Image (tube, coloured by chain):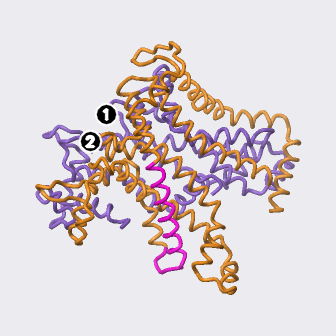
Chain colours: A purple, B orange
Amino acid sequence: MYLLPIYALLITGMKSFEEVNLYRMWDLPAKFSLESFTTAWFGSEGQGFRGLSPNFWNSMRLAVPATLLSALLGSMNGYVLSKWKFRGADALFMLMLFGMFIPYQSILIPLVQVLSSIELYGSISGLILVHVVYGIPITTLIFRNYYATVPGELIEASKIDGAGILGIYRHVIFPISMPGFAVVMIWQFTSIWNDFLFGVIVTPRPAVQPIMVALNNLAGSYIVEWNVQMAGALLAALPTMLVYVLLGRYFMRGLLAGSLKG
Amino acid sequence: MKAVASEAARTRVASLRFPNADRVISLLLIAPSLVALAVFVYGFIGFTGFASLTKWDSLTPDFTFVGLRNYARLFDTTRFQIDLRNTVTFTVLFLALCLSLGFLLAVLLDQRIRGEGIFRSIFLFPLAVSFIVTGVIWRWLLNPGSAQLGSTGINLLLDMVGLGFLKTGWYTDPKIGIKAVVVAATWQMSGYVMAMYLAGLRGIPVELRGAALVDGASEFQVYRHVIVPLLYPITLGAVIILGHISLKIFDLVVAMTGPGPAFSSDVPAFFMFDTTFRGNNFAQGAGIAVILLAMVAVLIVPYLVYSLRTEMQR
């Protein structure tokens, strides 16, 4: 049952155009063909629609830097909020966490105004900024939980050796942070890649849009055959599917961290 | 537990001791994030709240104060009334289906069956996919086809296995509308609930079940009186997470159905997008956004406060 949609997605994508027929959509393809994929990727000049390839690369240029930046910020915040707590640090952390639950509709109107006034509206850089800022709560949460498992003695010992806050981060914390970075980066990459709302609001120009917005446009257009839409859906899902298949273990941990105290 | 407490005590003592330079640097490290969130979350919410009290209904901002008029009008609008009903329907069905299916799958996988890893991966797989992709796939799966040309998608499949009487119009039928979206959302999210429950089940000591069985309880009674109560915290967590997702549901509706016939699959998040960014009725959009935020806050804030309290007690 769970695989049914994936089955439909795969066999439809692999059928040639002559074979594609909605009324026989569950039949296996008679001969293997990648036409649907190439059309979804490159577009069709004859029918007048754009392919997904430029948007795929837009998403890459968006998701990679935004993931790195928000992971770095999350790591620093998590370090301070777990190992250098000050009065009110926990309450402040809760205020930060609230930011990951809000419906983004409640910030979109001023967001567009502010991005326009700093001339980042309509650009990938603008989207990077947005994803980094709204990624802070979840990345901070995951790193704070991760660093809570680091024994306090380790920090104390370094302090006695005369190390300061930055030295301890560089020589003690950062080297053991890789599992934390893996979880956070996979989580952020997946959610930024899969985002639709920020993309559709911040980048109105089709040439700049990330892939999920482009896929939705492709699927909403009446001139595009349904097999091309299905092939496009598979292409758009491919990177996160690969991440899941290769690094599923870390993906799981991020997922459970997302449920707060997991 | 004791170890945790003593560690917390140590951190507290240590925090009294650390040198001033380090304290300043620690604040400088988190300052950019704090400022960003203060502006982008709290500042922006404040502005949206303010905008919802103004007359701003075109591309040029008009900040004439009109009090709660936008809210009064909203609750009088048929579309918004339908949206609120749809949200309730969606939330109830989505929660019921995800929780029961997730629990069932977790119990099945907990029996140490062969190929458990493969099954787990299959059930979790949809989570890696975006709501837009899910929406595109399910729009075709739940496309009913037509009476003249024949059935398509799931309807066709029902025909093929001889269950043709179960065929319906899915999202094209205003009586079903948003419920068709629930099917797709459940496909995507029930694996998540399964993962949470499975982690919980694995955390229950085997002796506990064994003891109850020795006392003469049936397998079913063990689940009812021992396992389910022990999993309450996980159920609560799942309800909060799924509940706030269902209040915010947007992408899936956009990709799968749009507002549907007679707004039968419309939701507040989509109405907000529609009226603000297509209709330029910013004040009305801000009003919907504030109502959405209030609904989510009612769910999330008590949970956050509760988590903070339990953490401080440790």
- Counting labels gives 2
Left/right of residue B236 with respect to residue A17 in the rendered view: right
Badge 1 crowding class, 10 Å Cα cut-off, few under 14, some 14 to 19, many 20 or more, is some
Mark 2 vs mark 1: give the one in front: 2
To which residue does mark 1 refer?
A: A206
Residue segment shown in magenta: B89-116
Q: Chain of mark 1?
A: A
To which residue does mark 2 refer?
A: A220
Residue type, label 2: Gly
In whole angstroms, how far apart are the C-alphas of marks 2 and 1? 14 Å
Q: Chain of mark 2?
A: A
User: Of helix, strand and loop, which mostly describes the magenta segment?
Assistant: helix
Left/right of residue B26 with respect to residue B46 in the rendered view: right
- Decide if residue A242 is in sight here: no
Left/right of residue B247 with respect to residue B274 in the rendered view: right
Compare marks 2 and 1 and give the one earlier in the sequence: 1
Residue A161: percent from the left, percent from the top?
A: 85, 49
Residues marked 2 and 1, same chain: yes
* Picture quarter with the N terminus of chain A: bottom left
> Which residue occupies 59% across, 66% down?
B199
> Which residue occupies 22% across, 66% down?
B164
